[in-house]
Image (cartoon, helix red, strand yellow):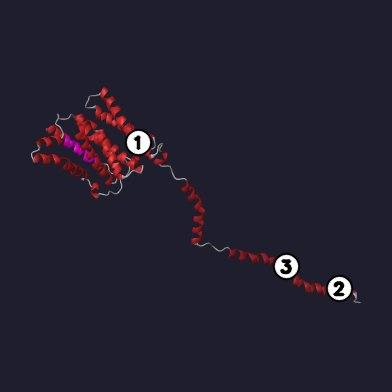
Amino acid sequence: ATPPAANVAATHSDQICMTPILLLLLETSALQPRSRLPAVRHAREPRSASTVRLCDREAAAPTEAAETATPPATAESNSLLGPREAALASVPLFFLLQSTTVGLARSGLAPDLAPPVGRAAAFGLFAAVQAASGTSVDTWLLRPAAEPEWRWLAAPWAPAAVFAAFAAAALAPALACQLFGQAEVAEALLPAGGPPPSAARCLDVLLLAPLTEEAFFRGWLLTASARAGAPRAASAAASAALFALWHAGDGAGGLLAFAALGGWLAVVYQAGGGRLAPCVGGHVLWNALILALRAAR
């Protein structure tokens, strides 16, 4: 048996031997969380620029898809009628407004002053009705012109060239008949004579009539026909026919002349990328020539 003093000494020696081990375990447990932190930091590597762009693109994808699914409203989507129905309804509307307003103007104004006042009022009402139905003037009257197929139509002298080409073709038969002694045929092909026009008549024939007629028969009608999917040739033919019908009071010879003029100006409008200036200018010059021929005869 070991004496009590020896047991105490052995126990003390065991405690002394265990002390470094306990201190080592405590130190290891205290340092263990600190040793894991750098590993966690190193695991979160910084993202590259391409990774950031890819994540941003994926995050923006739902927003782009939502914008694509709900396109912004346009003039055509706001229209109460389809393109074909709007075109078919607006043609008789234009004719009706013109005849009504001119008739009302004649009841209270001088005979020469009624047509220009009626034309201006009718065209304003027509544009207002179109805007109320969802077709604003920006889509057919003030829309920007496209690149012309005939580049000379973008030149400042295009109206004079449009007029000269049509005048040469229209007056060539009369001149030929005059040269070959067919005076009666030439007289039938030329406009009839009349008194010099008044200032109000000149205002109507040389300004308001070309502006309003070209704005409707070329600007609005050809734009509406293209929006409805009609072929270009059919649209030009419809413009020529309605333009001749609009001038039906000038007789059979006048119908043919106005149909030819309307068809030529429709082709000019289409080939010019939707430019109204050559059509209006050519129309003004042609009307001026007709007034001069009538006054001279």
Query: Percent from the top left, x then y, of residue 109?
Result: 25, 24
Query: Percent from the top left, x then y, of residue 44?
Result: 58, 63
SS category of the residue bearing label 1: helix
Query: What residue type is disc 3 on?
Result: Leu
Asked if residue 126 can be seen in this view, the reply is yes
| Extreme residue in the top direction | 108
Query: Mark 1 packing: few (<14 Cα in 10 Å), some, or many (20+)?
Result: few
Q: Main secondary structure of the magenta part?
A: helix
Lower position in the chain sequence, tag 1 or tag 2: 2
Quadrant holding the C terminus: top left
Quadrant holding the N terminus: bottom right
Which residue is under mark 3? Answer: 26
Magenta stretch containing residue 286, yes or no?
A: yes
Segment tinted magenta in the rendering? 279-290
Which residue is under mark 2? Answer: 8
Tell me if label 1 and label 2 are in contact, CB under 8 Å. no
Give the label, 1 or 2, closer to the camera. Answer: 1
Instruction: Give the residue displayed 37% in from the left and 39% down from the top.
Output: 84
Instruction: Give the residue displayed 24% in from the left and 39% down from the top.
Output: 262
Question: Residue 128 bears which disc, if any?
Answer: none
Question: Of residues 67 and 149, which is closer to you in this image?
Answer: 149
Q: Is residue 137 left or right of residue 116?
A: right
Residue 12: which quarter of the image?
A: bottom right
Which residue is under mark 1? Answer: 88
Give the CA separation, mark 1 to mark 2. Answer: 120 Å
Lower position in the chain sequence, tag 2 or tag 3: 2
Lower position in the chain sequence, tag 3 or tag 1: 3
Residue 153 versus residue 8 in the image, above or below: above
